């Protein structure tokens, strides 16, 4: 990916989006290329997502976050992840937005960049004072955003946010070994299925704190599924996961939710996304046959 030019990445990603291909890409894009990508992504619909890490020009190095998110969403179809640098501090200064006849080529190039930045900021209604930030775009429109704190926001923080938007990231606490028994349970929920999952978890040995919390939440969600199916409120676990994921993601958008509750909900979303990912992986495998 590093050998490709910015325009080639934008063109390749855009072409893949239009074709509905399983595009995953990472790059630093200029504002004009990014707007072109969004315009073309409208034709792909909500099934494709563009994740943009907006930051001020010459500010902190965000590639660590962007590259990790790209790697961890590699198994998630139709995700394009990119950095977009904005010369934010000069966009409201008229003297910095016009080319000077006697300006050097570099000065003229900088002005053109700022003009492109201004056009993008206006088109997307971005608040330049709240940079850096991560935005999720679907169908060419921003559907969610989070403020990035340069000294404290981690890759896990960003990926937890992306999970609330249905973008699955295989983080270090993901447990692919549990997907097979989990899928079996979801198709036919039962107490035996929960016991079997508990045994599979024990086979993993000592777990990290993150994985320990995730497995506890998985078992908790599975117990809820058994009750829902037993009460005839859901057909099976597959149906429950889809509805519950949408419900919790919607609740996460409420400003009334406390930080402590959000942490719990983010963990539940991770568990539900793990289940959803197992369902999606099986569907994708069948489609390839």
Image (cartoon, grey):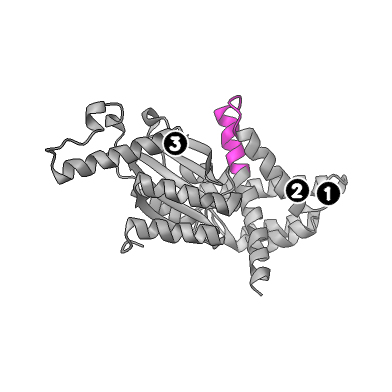
x%, y% of residue 116? 33, 41
Q: Looking at the image, is mark 3 or mark 1 earlier in the sequence?
A: 3
Report the disc number at residue 240: 2
Left or right: residue 161 versus residue 229 is left
Q: Residues within 10 Å of mark 3 (few under 14, many from 20)?
A: few
Against 149, residue 83 (above or below) is below
Residue furthest to the bottom in view is 289
Secondary structure character of the magenta stretch overall = helix
For label 1, the residue is 229
Disc 2 vs disc 1: Cβ atoms closer than 8 Å?
A: yes
Mark closer to the chain start, 3 or 2: 3
Residue sitting nearer the eye, 84 or 197: 84
Question: 47 or 8, which is in the foreground?
Answer: 8
In the image, residue 174 lies at what x, y percent?
55, 55
Q: Which residues are magenta?
A: 253-268
Label 2 to label 1: alpha-carbon separation: 9 Å
**Left or right of 145 in this view: 242:** right
Q: Earlier in the sequence, mark 2 or mark 1?
A: 1
Residue that label 3 marks: 123
- Seen at 70% across and 60% down, the residue is 183
């Amino acid at each position: 990916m590093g050998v490709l030019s910015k325009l080639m990445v934008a063109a390749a990603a855009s072409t893949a989006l239009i074709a509905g291909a399983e595009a995953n890409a990472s790059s630093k894009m200029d504002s004009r290329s990014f707007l072109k990508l969004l315009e073309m992504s409208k034709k792909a619909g909500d099934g494709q997502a563009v994740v943009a890490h907006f930051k001020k020009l010459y500010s902190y190095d965000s590639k660590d976050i962007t590259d990790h998110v790209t790697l961890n969403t590699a198994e998630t179809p139709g995700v394009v992840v990119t950095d977009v640098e904005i010369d934010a501090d000069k966009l409201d200064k008229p003297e910095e937005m016009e080319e000077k006849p006697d300006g050097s080529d570099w000065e003229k190039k900088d002005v053109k960049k700022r003009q492109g930045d201004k056009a993008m900021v206006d088109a997307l209604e971005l608040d330049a004072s709240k940079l850096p930030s991560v935005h999720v775009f679907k169908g060419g429109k921003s559907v969610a955003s989070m403020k990035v704190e340069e000294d404290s926001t981690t890759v896990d923080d960003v990926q937890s946010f992306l999970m609330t938007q249905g973008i699955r990231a295989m983080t270090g606490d993901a447990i692919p070994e549990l997907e097979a028994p989990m899928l079996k349970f979801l198709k036919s929920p039962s107490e035996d299925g929960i016991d079997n999952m508990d045994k599979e978890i024990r086979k993993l040995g000592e777990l990290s704190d993150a994985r320990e919390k995730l497995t506890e939440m998985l078992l908790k969600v599975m117990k809820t599924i058994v009750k829902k199916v037993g009460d005839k409120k859901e057909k099976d676990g597959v149906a429950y996961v889809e509805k519950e994921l949408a419900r919790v993601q919607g609740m996460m958008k409420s400003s009334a939710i406390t930080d402590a509750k959000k942490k719990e909900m983010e963990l539940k979303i991770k568990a539900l996304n793990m289940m959803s990912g197992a369902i999606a992986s099986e569907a994708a495998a069948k489609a390839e046959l």
